[in-house]
Amino acid sequence: MREYKNQLDITDEYGDLMTIEDWNDAVKSGCFNCFDGIGFWVKDGYESEDEVFYSPQYDATHVAWYNK
C-alpha cells in the first residue's frame, strides 16, 4: 500500500488540490498530461511521493498538482 508522509502544503501561488473526480475529468479532457507539470496522490492532508501519471490511485482521495 502507499505511504502518505508529506504534510500537504499548497498555497494559491504554488500548486492546486483537486478531487480524484475532478482530476480524472481534467485528464480525460486533455487539460493535464505528464509534460505539463507533476502531480502526487493525496489522502487525509498528506501527500505521497508517487507521481499520478506513473502509479495507480489506490486509496488516494485527491491530487496535488504543480504546473511547470
Image (cartoon, rainbow, N blue to C red):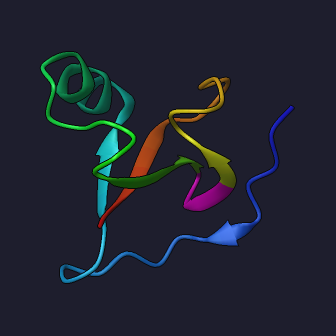
Q: Nearer the viewer, residue 68 or 43?
A: 68
Q: Is residue 62 above or below residue 44?
A: above
Q: Say left or right for 11 vs 2.
A: left
Mostly what secondary structure, the magenta segment?
A: strand
Q: Quadrant of the N terminus?
A: top right
Residue at left offset 20%, top offset 20%: 25
Q: Could you tell me which residue is drawn at 31 percent across and 36 percent down?
A: 33
Q: Quadrant of the C terminus?
A: bottom left
Image quadrant where residue 11 sits: bottom left
The percent coordinates of residue 60 (x first, y second) are: 58, 35
Would residue 50 appear left or right of 25 to someone viewing this image? right
Whether residue 64 is situated above or below residue 8 in the rendered picture: above
**Residue plotted at (62% across, 61% down):** 46
Identity of the residue drawn at 22% across and 16% down: 28
What range is drawn magenta here?
44-48
Residue 9 at x, y = what percent? 47, 78
Residue 4 against residue 62 in the figure, above or below:
below
53 to 64, vertically: above or below: above
Q: Residue furthest top?
A: 28
The residue most toward the right is 1
- Does residue 3 appear to the left or right of 19 in the view shown? right
| Number of numbered discs | 0
The image quarter in which residue 26 lies: top left
Q: Position of residue 2 (x, y in %)?
A: 80, 39
